[in-house]
Image: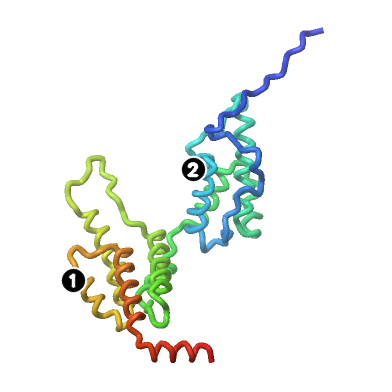
Amino acid sequence: MPPRVAPVIPAPIDTNSIFYVHPSEGLNSVVVTPCLNGSNYLSWSRSMCRALGAKNKFAFVDGSLPVPDLQDLNRSAWERCNHLIHSWILNSVSELIAQTLVFHENCFDVWQDLQERFSKIDRIRIATIRSSINNLKQGSKSILEYFTEMKALWEELHSHRPIPSCTCVHQCRCAAMRDARNFYLEDQVIQFLTGLNSEFSVVKTQILLMDPLPTLNKVYSLVVQEESNNQSLIPADESNLLVNASDA
């Protein structure tokens, strides 16, 4: 009778290892909402990247982690992580899209499939966003509501058209890229000020005369302060009239 060979018991996986999975994590541990429906790929992929990064699992989908050989001691750990990530992605896409992904064996292939299908530049959407930005006015909205709506549009536009950065081997000495970024940020400030109601014309002019032009967040803070000042200047009798009208 041949001698018995003790089974190889894998060593415990270090908690800092990319193959580590917490005992509480399962197939439903990651669900990104809203689910991917095709048109929201850019925002969805960003959220999914953050979720995978928080779990120390993004390397499984970006191609930087090679698949271990069958004889590799990490193979079983890799397969477990691969199945988990595949399930997390399926949980975070629409049912129709999920049906096209179930037969992939590698979560990297799943990620590549989605990227190839949905990450193409959507020029129609870019045109729609630009039109929305140009036509957006404060109107009856508060400064917070107006600012939030405009910033969301700028953020979406940036996801389609990110500010380019220099990729030269030797860092450029000219300020072209820096100036391009500054012009882009100044456009946001100018567009925000342009859409304000007429009661902010004074503070708008004051801000536009500043050199350098403040950041968008700083401008928002100045305009909110002006909004508070305007509200505090409402005569008491007019304020009571507004309150009574709202109670009627």
Outermost residue, right direction? 1
Q: Where is residue 139, by image quadrant?
A: bottom left
- Residue where numbered disc 1 is placed: 209
Question: Do we see residue 192 in this rendering?
Answer: no
Circle 1 residues within 10 Å: few <14, some 14–19, many ≥20: few
| Classed neighbour count for the residue bearing mark 2: other residues with Cα under 10 Å, few (<14), some (14–19), many (≥20) | some
Q: Nearer the viewer, mark 2 or mark 1?
A: 1
Q: Residue at x 41, y 71 (%)?
A: 144
C-alpha distance separating marks 2 and 1: 46 Å
Percent x, y for residue 239? 41, 87
Q: Residue at x 41, y 77 (%)?
A: 142
Front in this rendered view, residue 197 or 43: 197
Most extreme residue toward the front is 236
Taking depth in this image into account, of 155 and 95 the one nearest to the observer is 155
Which of the image's four quarters has the C terminus? bottom right
**Three-letter residue code for mark 1:** Leu
Residue at point 65% right, 41% down?
Answer: 24
In the displayed structure, would residue 5 be above or below residue 19?
above
- Quadrant housing residue 149: bottom left
Tell whether 42 sits left or right of 183: right
| Mark 1 residue element | loop
Q: Secondary structure at mark 2?
A: helix
At which x and y percent is residue 102?
A: 66, 49
Q: How many marks?
A: 2
Going by the image, does 47 lie left or right of 147?
right
State the mark number for residue 62: 2
